[in-house]
Amino acid sequence: MNDPEIFLNPCALCKRRKGERLCDYIVDYTSVIFYRSSNDFLGQERHTTCDLPMCTDCATKYNGHDFCPHHKKIHEQVRKQPTEQLERARQQEQIRQLNEYKKLEQNK
């Protein structure tokens, strides 16, 4: 006999098991400009995650995070992206920003 609890929160992917995990892939970043208190600042949510309910069989674990199959594919593509050319461009931008900061400091 099936567990009747499964109908309360089924896995969105297989629909056969209970959704015990939520997809942790960050889908949006949020930030407020003005805070009324330090508690508001510390208590804020800084990002929104996918939160697709999944069973343990359908979820993929990566460094302590659970990903749905869709976001697992995206995460794998992003991890493959940095090529030597992109890394060189990133380093050049960091050097440019550092030089700009030094010029600002000299003009003070």
Image (tube, rainbow, N blue to C red):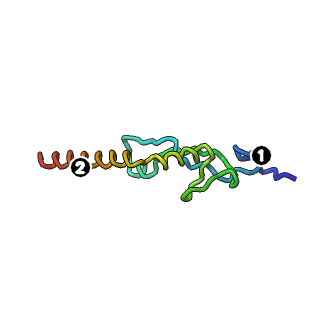
Question: Residue 107, percent across and down?
Answer: 11, 45
State which quadrant residue 33 falls in.
top left
Along the horizontal axis of the image, is 56 left or right of 2? left
Element under disc 2: helix
**Residue at the outermost right position:** 1
Element under disc 1: helix
**Residue at the outermost bottom position:** 64
Identify residue type, mark 1: Phe
Along the horizontal axis of the image, is 24 left or right of 21? left
Question: Residue 83, percent across and down?
Answer: 41, 48
**Residue at the outermost front position:** 84
Question: Residue 10, percent across and down?
Answer: 73, 46
**Which one is nearer the viewer's eye here, 34 or 21?**
21
Q: Residue at x 58, y 48 (%)?
A: 72
> Gap between marks 1 and 2, in whole Å?
56 Å
Q: Residue at x 36, y 49 (%)?
A: 87
Classed neighbour count for the residue bearing mark 2: other residues with Cα under 10 Å, few (<14), some (14–19), many (≥20): few
Identify residue type, mark 2: Leu
Label 2 sits on residue: 98
Q: Residue at x 58, y 44 (%)?
A: 50
Which dot marks residue 7? 1
